[in-house]
Amino acid sequence: MKQLLFTCLFFAIPCITQAAVFTLQPRTTNPSIESEWILDVMVQSEKPINAIEGSIAFPKNLLIMLSLSSAGSPINMWIETPRVEDSVISFSGIAPGGFSGASRRLFSISFMPMQTGKGTLTFKKVAAFAHDGTGSVVPAVTKPLPFTVQKKTSLSAYKEIQPLPDTIPPEHFVHEKRRAPNKAENPLLPSFFSAL
């Protein structure tokens, strides 16, 4: 039995390392009500890929989507530009030159949390295709993102910082107009000096 388990794991490891891994990376850990929450949709693949597709579902009772941005994405030809419909964000596109290696940002999502509670963002029907001339399917691994919407932080929760009292009186200056001794016109010029 142990030998069978080892054999299964041994053959499964190459599949995992050759998979395209899709993740959601929030720029802040947990959102709060009425504060913009931005996430990056990422993909990492050791095997070169040149096309992706899929969708992301989010709880519409907790989040409202504000915007989507694909600026800087390795996908430069979108078949379906990221768009939302009924709390599902769909996307598909290609990168003619292919890409691989370090995790890359496909696009970003901006949400507005509307009430407290726990929820999960989940990938649906995600696929990646190899940059090998045949468009063979690369195994896709997805990771859901659980989150908790917190109450909006009240400014009253912070202790008001009182300014330090200023006990030193301002220095007394005297203002006069004096003539410039080295000027032919001998004009009147303003002059300031301390009275101390």
Image (cartoon, rainbow, N blue to C red):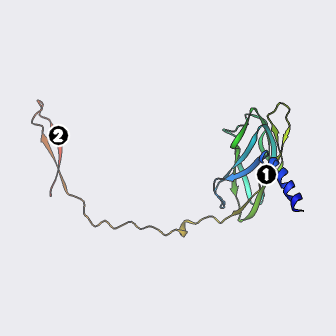
Instruction: Identify the residue shown where x is 55% and y is 69%.
Output: 157
Q: Which residue is mark 2?
A: 189
Instruction: Identify the residue shown where x is 79% and y is 44%.
Output: 18
Q: Residue 184: horizontal and vertical position, in percent?
A: 11, 29
Locate residue 195: give its quadrant: bottom left
Asked whether 150 or 92 is in front, the reply is 92
Q: Which mark is residue 133?
A: none
Asked whether 16 or 68 is in front, the reply is 16
Q: Residue 149: horizontal and vertical position, in percent?
A: 69, 63
Mark sitting earlier along the chain (1/2): 1
Q: Amino acid at mark 2?
A: Leu
Q: Which quadrant of the rendered structure holds the N terminus?
A: bottom right
Q: Which residue is mark 1?
A: 142
Q: Is residue 88 visible?
A: no
Q: Residue 191: horizontal and vertical position, in percent?
A: 17, 45
Q: Is residue 134 above or below residue 89?
A: above
Looking at the rendered structure, the secondary structure element under dot 2 is strand
Q: Residue 156: horizontal and vertical position, in percent?
A: 54, 69
